[in-house]
Amino acid sequence: SLAERSGVSPARVAALRSEAEALYLGTRPKTRAAAGAAAHLFQGVPMHWMVDWSTPVPLVVAEATGARLTDVDGHGYDDFCLGDTAALFGHGPPPVAEAVSRQARRGLATMLPSPDAAAVGELLSARFGLPSWQVATTASDANRFALRVARAVTGRPRILVFDGAYHGAVDETFVGISANGRVTNRPGLLGEPRDLTLLARVVPFNDLDALETALADNTVACVITEPVMTNCAMVLPQPGFHEGLREITRRHGTLLLIDETHTLSTGPGGYTGAHGLAPDLFVVGKAIAGGIPAAVWGMSAELAGRLESARAGAPSGHSGMGTTLSGSPLQLAALRATLEHVATDEAYAHMDALATRLEAGLAAAIAQARLPWHVVRCGARVEVVRAPAPLINGGEAHGAHFAALEAAIHLALLVRGVLISPFHDMMLASPATTQAQVDNLIAATGDVIRRLVD
Ligand code: PMP
């Protein structure tokens, strides 16, 4: 039962929810009016998943600066969601704001390089270690293009994803292991007539034996993975997992794509830099241009050479990689400002110290209430997991997910002036976040937990 597995009774969850909902609606007349006025947006929002947050009507943000939000009713929030990582370095970091406004007067979209292009290539190569880069507009796109490269150069049809992973709106990654152990298209995916499992394999994270078996017939072009799973709560790699993953993929001629879109929280060079990983393909999006839509994908020297040959050998025509606004002068200006002035060693030291403090404070609140939960962290990224012991794979993460409980907690935190990420319990510390904000979040969580258990 929910009570046994999450440590909280459904009645307590419902009470917390209705108390928070009444407070939310009762003190936000303009927010409610805004929802009523958005009749010509599908479901009243510019992007449909905005109605899936915990709020009875969407929070309408009037202003986001640093690590603070203000809604249209004038309520302020400490923002630990930070655009689900897009604002990992705070909202509108001043060097990015300055670069973007400067570039706006010199051209935003030319389909040609600007003088920032070469510098961005240098900065990416120095930071992440791979020598050859391309710019895309979203991490979803970057993953799509990187997977296309992998198939093009290997001539192999299949990709492999770990169960429970998320890599954006990338069709072929929407596969998973169902409750009865079968590999299937993921439930929830709309409009997909194809059986995606024909060209994708799925194995549990941290399971090197299953990986070995899945790669054995040498038909898999590429393994795509986050170095730490961050989209199904948080699953850390077990000792030896990354070494094994690299050894097995190499031995089978399968390329390795590391998607650092979320794990950029680890440090200046991502998890790859911090732990010396050696991917063939590397993707990072969201925060990499300080909140401007941009993503980058990098290749090893060997792979870049193979892609050159593949391009030279192909008839002329559309490659299936790239979009018109990719590599724009706007993106290059924002990438350069972020890499040179925002995502600095000092910024990461600040983020890491605050996230460490947050991890300890939340763990203490959970321990005091004797709840069967724990806290896990990946640099500036902190997650509360509703299971007593660390998760090993996506299946376990699925079992530790209690949607109604999480939504009630999120709304209860929101009316206490704190925003955390929706759909699971993720919190980020940015360079703009203060220790006082972290302490507010710890106190608010303690208060919410007491409502649930006392
Ligand atoms: N990769 C990972 C690991 C992600 O978590 C996400 C989005 N949550 C993406 C890629 C896709 O990013 P976007 O939605 O910006 O395309």
Image (cartoon, grey):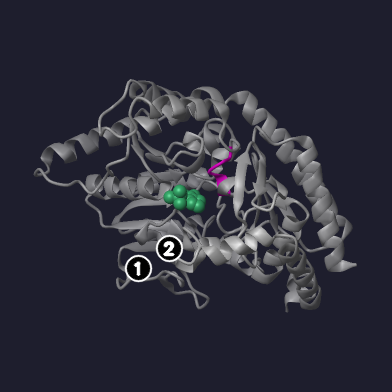
Q: Which mark is residue 202?
A: 2
User: In this rendering, does residue 253 appear at all?
Assistant: no
Secondary element under disc 1, as helix, strand or loop, is helix
Q: In terms of secondary structure, where does tag 2 sit?
A: strand
Which residues lie in the magenta part?
84-88
Q: In this orientation, which residue lies closer to the viewer: 32 or 203?
A: 32
Q: Position of residue 170 (x, y in %)?
A: 37, 56
Mark 2: give few (<14), some (14-19) or many (20+) Cα within 10 Å.
many
Q: Residue drawn at (60%, 47%), measured in percent from left and top?
A: 62
Q: State which tag comes first along the sequence, 2 or 1.
A: 1
Q: Quadrant of the C terminus?
A: bottom right
Q: Amino acid at mark 2?
A: Val
Residue 449 x %, y %: 82, 61
In the rendered image, which residue does mark 1 sit on?
197
Residue 240, image quadrant: top right
Tag 2 and tag 1, C-beta contact below 8 Å: yes
Q: Residues within 10 Å of mark 1 (few under 14, many from 20)?
A: many
Name the residue: 43% across, 41% down.
293
Residue extending furthest toward the left: 315
User: Is the residue 376 above or below the residue 268 in the image?
Assistant: below
Determine whether, in the image, residue 1 is placed left or right of residue 394. right
222 relative position to 336: left or right: left
| Tag shown at residue 238 | none
The image shows residue 372 at horizontal and vertical percentages of: 78, 63
Callout 1 amino acid: Thr
Q: Give x and y (percent) for residue 7.
A: 79, 69
Q: Please give left or right for residue 430 compared with residue 5 in the image.
A: left
Report the residue that reaches farthest toward the right. 454
The answer to whether residue 19 is above or below residue 352 is: below
